[in-house]
Amino acid sequence: MTTPGAEPLWENPLRRRLRERQPVFGITLTTPSLDVAARAASLGFDFLWIELEHSPITLETARHIVLATRGLGAMPVARLPVNELWTAKRALDIGMAGVIFPFTSSAALAQQAVEACQYPPHGRRGSGAGLATACWPDPLRYYDSADANLLIVAIIEEARALEEIDAIAATPRLDALFIGTSDLSFSLGFRGRQDPPELQAAIDRIKAAAERNGKAVGRPALDADQAKAFIADGFTLFQTATDLGFFERGAREFLEPLRNR
């Protein structure tokens, strides 16, 4: 939203790239280390997947990560522990550029996610964003800028979500569906296995619903070859390995040739 003669609002590069169907990659932060976060934000990732569901990162540490990574290229995005208004509010009010909502298994939950990220009259977000404005690229117009630019992602990771997948994907202002392939496998009864044809059929069904409704679609990608294959298949939003996963991979790469010393 702009007024005549006004400068256009800042545009979130994540939303722009996804709208243009360009891939975006996020490193998964699971350690409460500002050094790790700042280094990760400088490596070329498009965003930081700040893990608030499966890690010991607290809200206070998440705020420090936002502050420590300003201007470093990777946008801070939080995966919430639950799809609730209050959890989204607290993440957004510390300056996140986007929110990823887990277990969004119904159209009602998808709508709740969107409303949690929008100010009235379009949503239910409260107006206490003093901390967020301090590190937002367009602070004087934060309310309009945030409404227009926050990345809103729904994770599809339960079999019951398939019953409402078109309605979920049709939710206005929702930017992307992210397929939690491991949890979806568990929900379908396969204990995390990725090879069952039933899982692939569910993934295809979710991706088709996203595409029909003009939404980006994503999934985890743990290495470059896997990511390239998924990009060729139409996926554009990627959660990559964790900070510890990349650390372990680099350490093993160094140590493996030395095993027989």
Image: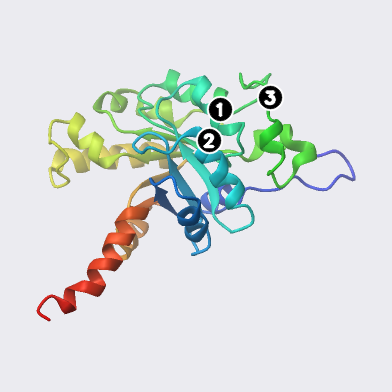
Foreground: disc 1 or disc 2: 2
Q: Alpha carbon of mark 3 to alpha carbon of mark 1: how far?
A: 10 Å
For badge 1, the amino acid type reads Arg
Residue drawn at point x = 30 percent, y = 23 percent: 163
Q: Which circle's residue, 3 or 1, is located before the other in the chain?
A: 1
Q: Vertically, is 115 above or below 195?
A: above
User: What label sits on residue 29 in the rendered view?
Assistant: none
Front residue of this view, candidates 155 and 77: 77
User: What label sits on residue 90 in the rendered view?
Assistant: 1
Q: Vertically, is 241 above or below 135?
A: below
Q: Are marks 3 and 1 in contact (CB under 8 Å)?
A: no
Circle 3 packing at 10 Å, graded few (<14), some (14-19), many (20+), is few
Q: How many marks?
A: 3
SS at circle 3? loop
- In percent of width and height, residue 71 lies at 64, 56
User: What label sits on residue 128 in the rendered view?
Assistant: 3
Residue drawn at point x = 61 percent, y = 38 percent: 95
- In percent of width and height, residue 113 lies at 50, 26
Q: Residue furthest right?
A: 5
Front residue of this view, candidates 171 and 135: 135
SS at circle 2? helix
For badge 3, the amino acid type reads Gly
Front residue of this view, candidates 68 and 242: 68
Q: Alpha carbon of mark 2 to alpha carbon of mark 3: how far?
A: 16 Å
Q: Are marks 1 and 2 in contact (CB under 8 Å)?
A: no
Circle 1 packing at 10 Å, graded few (<14), some (14-19), many (20+), is some
Q: Vertically, is 158 above or below 228?
A: above
Circle 2 packing at 10 Å, graded few (<14), some (14-19), many (20+), is few
Mark 2 = which residue?
60
For badge 2, the amino acid type reads Glu
In the image: residue 104, left or right of residue 37: left
